[in-house]
Amino acid sequence: MSRLAVPKTYKLYIGGAFPRSESGRTYEVLRADGAFLANVAKASRKDARDAVVAARGAVSGWSGATSYNRGQVLYRIAELLEGRRAQFVAEIEEAEGASRAVASAQVDEAIDRWVWYAGWADKFAQVTGNANPVAGPYFNISVPEPTGVVAIIAPQDSSLVGFVSALAPALVAGNSAVIVASERYPLSAISLAEVLATSDVPGGVVNVLTGSPAEIAPWLASHSDVNALDLVGAGDLDWVSLEIDAADTLKRVLRPEGGADAAAPTLGRITAFTETKTVWHTKSLK
Amino acid sequence: MSFLEYAPAPESRAILSLRDQYGLFIDGEFVEGRGTPFQTISPASEERIAMIANANAADVDDAVAAARRAYDRTWSKMSGRDRGKYLFRIARLVQERARELAVAESLDNGKPIKESRDVDVPLVAAWFFYYAGWADKLDHAGLGAGPRAHGVAAQVIPWNFPLLMLSWKIAPALAAGNTVVLKPAETTSLTALIFAEILQQADLPPGVVNIITGAGDTGANLVAHDDVDKVAFTGSTAVGRAIAKQIAGTDKKATLELGGKAANIVFDDAPIDQAIEGIVNGIFFNQGHVCCAGSRLLVQENIHDEVVERLKLRLSTLRLGDPLDKNTDIGAINSREQLERIRELSDIGVAEGADRWSVPCEIPENGFWYAPTIFTNVQTSSRIAREEIFGPVLSVLTFRTPAEAIAKANNTPYGLSAGIWTDKGSRILAVADKLRAGVIWANTFNRFDPSSPFGGYKESGYGREGGRHGLAAYLTPAPVGQAAVTAGRTGAKSVSAGRAAAKPATAGRRAAKPRIETKDAAKTTRSATPAKKGAAK
Amino acid sequence: MSGTSLVTARERALAVLGGEPDDQTLGRYLHGIPGVDAVGLEQRAAGLGTRSIKTSSKKWALDKIISLVDLTTLEGADTPGKVRSLVAKAMNPDPADPSTPRVAAVCVYGDMVPFAVDALGGAHGDPDDGLISVAAVATAFPSGRSSLEIKLADTAEAVAAGADEIDMVIDRGAFLAGRYGQVFDQISAVKDACRRADGTSASLKVILETGELVTYDNVRRASWLSILAGGDFIKTSTGKVSPAATLPVTLLMLEVVRDWHLATGHKVGVKPAGGIRASKDAIKYLVTVAETVGEDWLVPHLFRFGASSLLNDVLLQRQKMTTGHYSGPDYVTID
């Protein structure tokens, strides 16, 4: 006799906790063949608001951690993912209807991207910062610093690798993130949140919302306490309006990317969410 | 007359040979504008200096078309080495005509000649020298090998440092290989037009730089122009916001240098005499018409009274008056409109209960003037502590601990600059770390250098000007496959990564939206039929 | 002219210090004074140096400079003849123009004082009254490396010979070693040795030799120390060490004098000495005085230039302003 399975409840991830949507709403996520797969929380604007509050609260600690420490924490995510790769492969197979090989490749790539970005944590400042030889008796240095709270619309065509590709670079510099998962493939995102919750990533550094990006994105784009907006996965939304909303507080905006490998790894994705700070100090022997 | 009053020492205007009227500088020539010309006046005397052409939409079209032609036919094909040589030429010509430019700037803008002569114009030359050397070294700009120019850059600059802001815009744009249409501020077009003469002397190919004059609508037309690839704006946050909205959904790149409300933080162990100088320089330099001005003095409470007393003593030696007098410290407010805004906000400060103290000094009869003013007893909620006044008005607030200083300094939607004064090194570095501002001056203030990136956090805008970062703002990485990889792949065997490798890295920067594709197509069409006008002027 | 009495100076010091002027108390006090940012100080000085002094202001400035000069000869080769020549120049700087003011003082080695006094004759007296003082360097000038007894004898002898002003050097070694009490005591003792039998006192200028103190923080501390110990003037340099007077150092010392005046109501003089050769430079010092402590300080008992060749350059400039054409070195006298 076969055992009755225990289905998983997919909730939001906000401030290190897994609440249901305050609205009480859920939506059905289907398999590739159209069969019911799971109920997933459908985040409301208030959930988005709470996520921003949690993200803001986490900025100081995360950006204040040493780069070495951030690198280790990000690497730890890769380690934990590796340990649970079977779960993720299975989830992707079910959700995307992908073959085991393709699903495995996606998980491998996601893990490798965490590793790649983890390694950047204590290097990008060296590559993008500068000692500036000003014409005067000054010590002058430019360093990249985190922009603050980054709201991300994750790539919509991918369960895991898109999500990771958008999230990881934002974290490298010390930003905290509110990321709206793929509407169609949200399960890996929440499972990843479960990994994050048991990793060393402080609560609030990553906040995952599931539901309708079209519904949530405008609230994030117009939120005054969001500093940057990554529209990588917003290509099918009215993203021009989102960009216009974001302009109200001069948010830094990355425009949508199409294609299966949206948000492919680049140093540029790290620096997109940094601010160059230049510090001058007088110098003299006298 | 006492010695301290000093006899007048006016800089001679004889060096200037101004025209009665100035046209638009398009395609290497001065042409008449089709809008209604306007006069530019000396804010110190309200006397008319010259009539300035006004570019209407058709003129903007012409200017952008000229820039596009120059980009397609000349500038994008020229070697970096030769582009650099043009910039070096320009730098030298600026040096040769430095005094003339300084006099014109002070006349038109109202700033003291000692500032235009010792700060603005030398920095203009330095900016061109610095970026000249970059033109043939773009592979090292931080974007990987073979980065590309954006194309046509639309640049709109403010009236506070007219020629300096021009150099901040034009020098990196040209070094990176872009062509330019620049619009100076309505009240300060003069030096940009003299600069156009310098471009003619330098034999810069026609159309590489076009300078169109006019008011806000001219700037708006320029920024909105379909054939512009890059927008660089320095000015108010309100206009910057409008530009950001306007270019939303396009593939235009933007650099925005906007407002500020900088905190200048003075700890009780500060080198006090230098801190006083830094406070003075921070807010009274250029009549406070400085986006990075240290307009909020945050002083540790236990030295508040001493600092304010010393400040008042020091301010009493400032000389307000004729901008062309070499001994003038405080020149004229740039326009009646700006003067009204300063007055309005100052009156609000009084109404809110702050204590106003102004330097007792004689105000000239004509022109626009505002005596250096300090507000004490200012609360963090006061409008004069939150809004950018853009004038010689300092708001003094207090703090008790470093953490409180940081919290108050950061408690603003702006984030352009900040100052720290203390003898304690570890505190300087820690406070600098925590301040959310793009430029931090420690034991100094208002220093600028072409090698030093400048720009803000938050609503002070985005992008940097100056240094390698300022160059990168005018470049885009080479398509993948045509350059050494800027940021390696994970080297993965995965399907998706493999697919992506064949795709240009820049694709991500272009929106996958029909309207963008339409625009790209339009651009192709345009390049195919480059010159449809030219003699129309 | 005479400085404040020793008792008053000491009482004032005790009140300011809140204790005996020993190494510890002085150290705590001097190291509690806010630091100096060298770059900012030099920028401020450079800014003051860009003042453009023209026409009537320049004419006033040139005459003012002459009236503030301590015309100086401090050579091993000095002779009575050289001193007489110097005095003649001091009394009548420009024979071609009797409207030229006299200098404030002649500054010589102690053994030359009798010759200076003799040569001045009736012109010897207080520069505030239009007369000329005799200043003597003392205390084992310029190094200051001798016993206190010798320094005091050096001082007393010069005063007895008729010196109105004593330019002493501090013990830079002691200062740099942190023996502030010793420096204080020596200045006090020299100040005491400046007293004459009739109860009046020669004015005491305390030379810091800023070129050996090197840092601005040291200069600021040494300035406070010298003032606390009773110096009537603080003076930058002996002229034997490079750099001698600089505008930033002088600005810094003026700031100390200003702060001391604000704190106590007592005015102390400043004397930049050495290296100021051109009128143009001297005018920068006047500007710096006027904008730092006020024009009130531009009087002989509060500001001096220690210089020799400066005078002729001022005279050349003065001739230019009078005649409208440029003059040349043959039209001013060598002394």
Image (tube, rainbow, N blue to C red):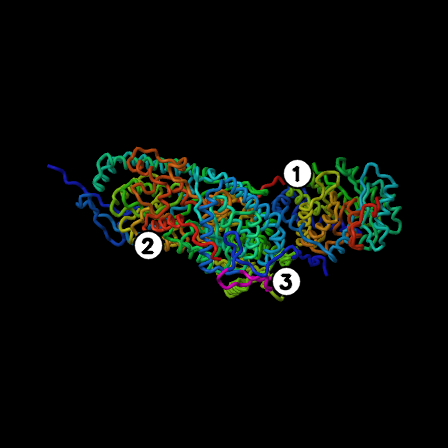
Is residue A89 found left or right of A56 in the rendered image? left
Work out how far the residue at label 2 is from the one at label 3, CA to CA, in angstroms. 53 Å
Task: Please tell me whether residue A81 is drawn above or below residue B322 in the rendered image.
Answer: above
Work out how far the residue at label 1 is from the one at label 2, CA to CA, in angstroms. 67 Å
Circle 3: element type: loop
Q: Are marks 1 and 2 on the same chain?
A: no
Name the residue beneath numbered marker 2. Answer: A218
What residue sits 89% from the left and 49% below the top?
C121
Give the residues in magenta: B33-52
Amino acid type, label 3: Cys
Amino acid type, label 1: Gly
Q: Which quarter of the image is occupied by the C terminus of chain A?
A: top right
Which residue is more in the foreground, C282 or C146? C282
Picture mark count: 3
Image coordinates of residue B327 in percent, x first then y, are 66, 55
What residue sits 64% from the left and 44% below the top?
C30
